[in-house]
Image (cartoon, coloured by chain):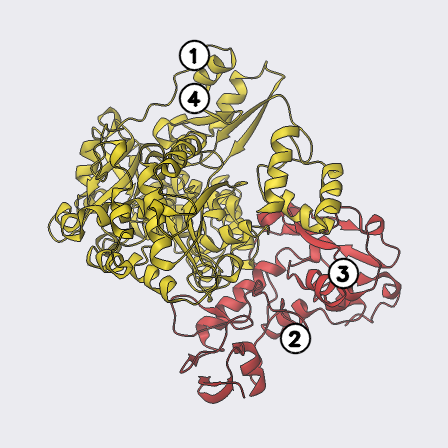
Amino acid sequence: MSRQVELTINGKAVSVPVGTTLWDAAAAIGIDIPVLCHEPRLRPVGVCRLCVVDVGARTLAAACVRPCEEGMEVRTDSEEVEAHRRTLLELLLADQPDESARENTTGDDALYELARRYGIKDIPLPDGAAGHPRGRDDSSPVIAVDHQACILCDRCIRGCDEIQHNNVITRTGKGYETRIAFDLDTAMGESTCVACGECVAVCPTGALTHKAVHGLRLEEET
Amino acid sequence: MRLLKAMLALQASEGAVTDAALRKLARAENVPLYRLQGLRSFYPVFREQPGRPVQVQVCRDLVCRMAAGGAPADAVRDVLAGRGDAEITEVSCLGQCDHAPAAMVDNHPVCGGPRALQQYLAGEPAPSPVQSDSLEHWPTDPYDSAGQHYATARSLLAGGDPESVIAALKQAGLRGLGGAAFPTGMKWEFTRKAEGAEKYVICNADESEPGTFKDRVILEDLPHLVIEGMLLGAWVIGARRGIIYLRHEYHAAEQALGTAIAAARRAGALGRSVFGGDFAFDLEVFVSPGGYIMGEETALLEALEDQRGEPRNKPPFPTNAGLNGRPTLINNVETFSAVTTIAARGADWWNAQGIDDHAGLKFVSVSGDVARPGVHCVPWGTTARDVLKRCGGMAEGRALKAFSPGGASTAFLPPDKLDTPLDFDTMQAAGSALGTGAMVFVAEHRDLLDVTLAQVRFFRNESCGKCVPCRVGSRKAVELVEQVQRGESPRPGVSLAALHATLAKTSICGLGQVALLPLVDALATFPDEPSLQALREEEP
């Protein structure tokens, strides 16, 4: 039997096996921690930072990658933590295209959903889509790539590599200029992509969507 | 290292790492194409196509910007306008701040500005960089002659107790001199106790923060102290293999290390049977494919594992899970050299070198508006005022407006803090940090917005892009401030202090955590600075 660690999350005691992440421990007792880069089927990478929580350290910890430790006292919803999450969402939303292909079709854009939850309407930051458009790639017959909607959460890369073992997608470039790419930065339609659809399935935004459903536009709210 | 070494060899021989070359490499190494694209596009030394025959890299960062009175590349472009064979690229700090404005031509440092570049390119002898304070004998070197090198390790390995080295480091109070100030003795103890079939010792020789160049001088002048410190580390923790991770612009240091490693092998200090005993240890130099972020120790480990140099989430720490998941001792160049000094002379001697209750000797890099920039080895506890005096005071007799005691990641201090003794705690108490000991002095005529924004731009330029706060936050902050600078907006529109707080609290590594610090801190520390007025949240 594996060793257990005891900790409290938002004052609630919880006992989990050694190695359990804070995100999983919180989920086990019904505490939802917002996250964009993590998806339970995938190895967590801790890059969107929305799941940061207060563990009493100098910096906040990303719950999706941080293992639980004995005696930890974790706050997932303090005013400070929520303020930082809000700023992170604003940073991501500042670069989003005017319309999300996912929100308009299947209606499940996770970034938009969080923006609604946090009541974010105006973004007080320079518009990246207008200032530095990132472009799109429509070369694949079935998958549409909108780099502007990509938040570099790494989910498509892990889905392609670790779930499907197709090994096609990478991050290319560095810093703010980073974007996803296929093979040696080849157009998706000319790459070794087999169009399995895993990247579309795990993408949380309108960056990777099925072209087939683009005609099925959801009714717009009036 | 295998893939990156193959790509570095391609870049060196072909002047580029082309698609065709990567397809061939992917087949030979049995790795997917995307993996090689990820590497080629991340590291600045790689290019997809060969460039023009003459590659001129011009530093764009703070100290060179101050020396050039604006963007240094502008003046270089003017002077080299007729040279169709030359390609001018703006690059981050080259670690030659004592000879600002600095540039490199085909990997050769050419310092002194556009005129010197013109001379060099015309085949005339350009003034080569001269170390302004290079001593015949640095006070940290316990040896009078090359014949004595490695005597300390020889005697310790012959029957000493590894724990005694840890005890000496603790007694000397040595802390990491790469900027993070983690207690060295503790780090060695953790790595010694960590369980692993194999362990590694790595020297972080990737100093790249604007204003920092002291490791360059230590590597060139005292490479034997660094190698001996690594050997002692290997012996204490039980490692057989060491790697010096060297920044790619330090060619003279690479040569000095190569010569010193060969000498160490001849002296029996490296090899299958160190000093003829049953302890085996050898080391190699790995030249970084570039980027400031590689000095972040887990990014460095990613590079050594042939990945994009993106910092890891911590814990685990390298002491337990470092290179290839094995316990790894990583220290900075100056730290390893100080270990040798302490092991040779003893902790009591080391402690007696400092002023008052400060212990030891510290290498500082001094640059900016001082009469004689350079590297100095000073007792801990020396005041910033004394350091300035050693450099001949302020250039052209100007008054001091601000100084950064520790490099781009540390806050600027006003002149009334000049009497602060150099130490980690004292600088922190004064409102800044000692960082790497990169002291940049700024004269009264400078615009502090331009100065601090240059530091923030450096971090934006060097962000790896892995996490959202640093990748997007550093970019947006610079855009907001530039909009105000250009008069397009009266104020930033968001609180820069709040944005900084998010980067500081949620970024994965130190780069994002300090990216906005120099500018945001200056808003509070320099309330009367005219250039910063428009950035304040409240109406003036």
Of residue B165 and residue A197, the one placed in the foreground of this image is B165
Residue B56 appears in which quarter of the rendering?
top right
**Between residues B510 and B312, which one lies in front from this camera angle?**
B312
- Residue B447, image x, y percentages: 36, 37
Confirm whether residue B536 shows in the render: no
* Amino acid type, mark 1: Pro
Dot 1, how many residues are within 10 Å of its Cα: few (below 14), some (14-19), or many (20+)? few
Give the distance between the C-alpha atoms of the residues marked 4 and 2, in whole angstroms: 55 Å
The residue that mark 1 highlights is B125
Residue linked to disc 2? A40
Q: Chain of mark 1?
A: B
For residue B145, above or below residue B241 = above
Marks 4, 1: nearer the viewer: 1
Image position of B267 (left or right of B377): right
Describe residue B12's horizontal placement relative to residue B537 as left or right: right
Residue carrying label 4: B113
Viewer-side label of 4, 2: 2
What residue is pinned by disc 3? A208
The residue that appears at 29% across and 50% down in the rendered structure is: B525
Looking at marks 4 and 1 on the same chain, the residue that comes earlier in the sequence is marked by 4
- Residue projecting furthest to the left: B356
Mark 3 touches mark 2? (CB < 8 Å):
no
- Assess whether mark 1 and mark 3 are in contact (beta carbons under 8 angstroms): no
| CA gap, disc 4 and disc 1 | 14 Å
Circle 4: is it few (<14), some (14-19), or many (20+) Cα within 10 Å?
many
Residue, x 81% and y 55% (percent of image)?
A193
Residue B285 vs B170, above or below: the answer is above
| Residue B343 seen | yes
Chain rendered red:
A
Please state which amino acid type lies under the numbered disc 4: Gly
